[in-house]
Image (spheres, rainbow, N blue to C red):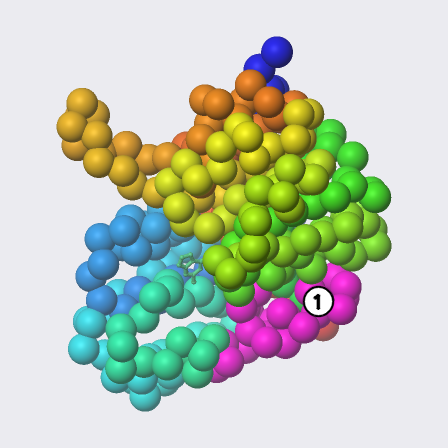
Amino acid sequence: MPAEIIDGIAIAAKVRARVAEDTAALKKRGVTPGLTAVLVGEDPASSVYVASKERACKEAGMNGRSIRLPASTTEEALLAVIDTLNNDPTVHGILVQMPVPKQISEQKVIRRIAQQKDVDGFHPFNVGKVFTGDVDGFAPCTPAGVQVMLAEAGVETSGKDAVIIGRSNIVGKPMAALLLQSGKTANCTVTLCHSKTRDLASHTRRADILIAAIGKPEMVTADMVKPGAVVIDVGINRVEDPSAPKGYRIVGDVHFESVREVASKISPVPGGVGRMTIAMLLANTVRAAQLTLEG
Ligand code: GUN
């Protein structure tokens, strides 16, 4: 029997509905949660992401703003913009869209954002909190979204073998930390695989929960998956397809058609993890706003 689909669109809508409720409650207390996204340069994909973040904020009743700066912006000028946002009490979350142009240090930018406004969860302070299991911090949106998807899909994680492919700071490493914690939708035995892992399939075939975040189109094939495994596909890859209206189509890191015949549950691309990232960004921003009231 083909795997059950883990519907990221429906789960993200549920998260966003909760965010809208929390936003309405905060507004009654005189606080409108605000997220400002900063985009440096004109990268078309980044521009689309930033616009969709702004739109999603507005749909939830939050203040969504974006600041668009030219590609020639100096590091000093960007850091000054961040300082202004750090000091603006109407801004609860700050996001600088990555990547930034070459003349700007990504690490300096990440460290400059006030940790209590770092709704991306990229600041070393928040990274440390995620790794030490301190739930006061902000977890990066994509792995946090995967954890919510597992919970909503009713996946039992405790004691299970979770294998993650990809060791990025944005997905792989924090994903490993979240699944490793003691707590709900966690308690996994985690294996983190990467480009230098020997015999990748010998690891993936042991996985009860397999998470692919490598950025290689359809790399995970059915022979790499244990029958009955839960498969979460974080990849978003453009592949040429002359028969598609735009000349390309979007695929994940998992070969969906073959793997769905082996897995018990699988998240599709599109319609899977992608929708969760923005939903979790909104959830982090609302929490940042709530924390300002708690002092
Ligand atoms: N670029 C790609 N994904 C992300 C993200 O989650 N946050 C930021 N700030 N930039 C990104």
Closer to us: 71 or 171: 171
Q: Which residues are magenta?
A: 111-136
Q: Residue at x 37, y 35 (%)?
A: 251
Residue 275 place in picture, x, y as percent = 47, 39
Residue 8 vertical position relative to residue 133 in the rendered view, above or below: above
Closer to us: 93 or 33: 93
Residue 74 place in picture, x, y as percent = 26, 84
Question: Residue flagged by tag 1: what amino acid is it?
Answer: Phe
User: Is 186 displayed left or right of 42 in the figure?
Assistant: right
User: Is 158 displayed left or right of 22 in the figure?
Assistant: right
User: Is 27 displayed left or right of 46 in the figure?
Assistant: right
Quick check: can you spot residue 3? yes
State the SS at label 1.
helix
Q: Is residue 167 magenta?
A: no
- Dividing the image into 4 quarters, which one contains the N terminus? top right
The residue sitting at the top extreme is 1
Residue 141 vertical position relative to residue 276 in the rendered view, above or below: below
Residue 257 place in picture, x, y as percent = 45, 22
Residue 31 vertical position relative to residue 250 in the rendered view, above or below: below
Q: Residue at x 57, y 65 (%)?
A: 121
Residue 76 place in picture, x, y as percent = 32, 88
Q: Residue at x 71, y 67 (%)?
A: 131
- Dividing the image into 4 quarters, which one contains the C terminus? bottom right
Q: Is residue 133 magenta?
A: yes
- The number of callouts visible is 1
Quadrant containing ligand 1 reads: bottom left
Quick check: can you spot residue 22? no
Disc 1 designates what residue?
131
User: Is 109 displayed left or right of 159 in the figure?
Assistant: left
Q: Residue at x 63, y 43 (%)?
A: 202
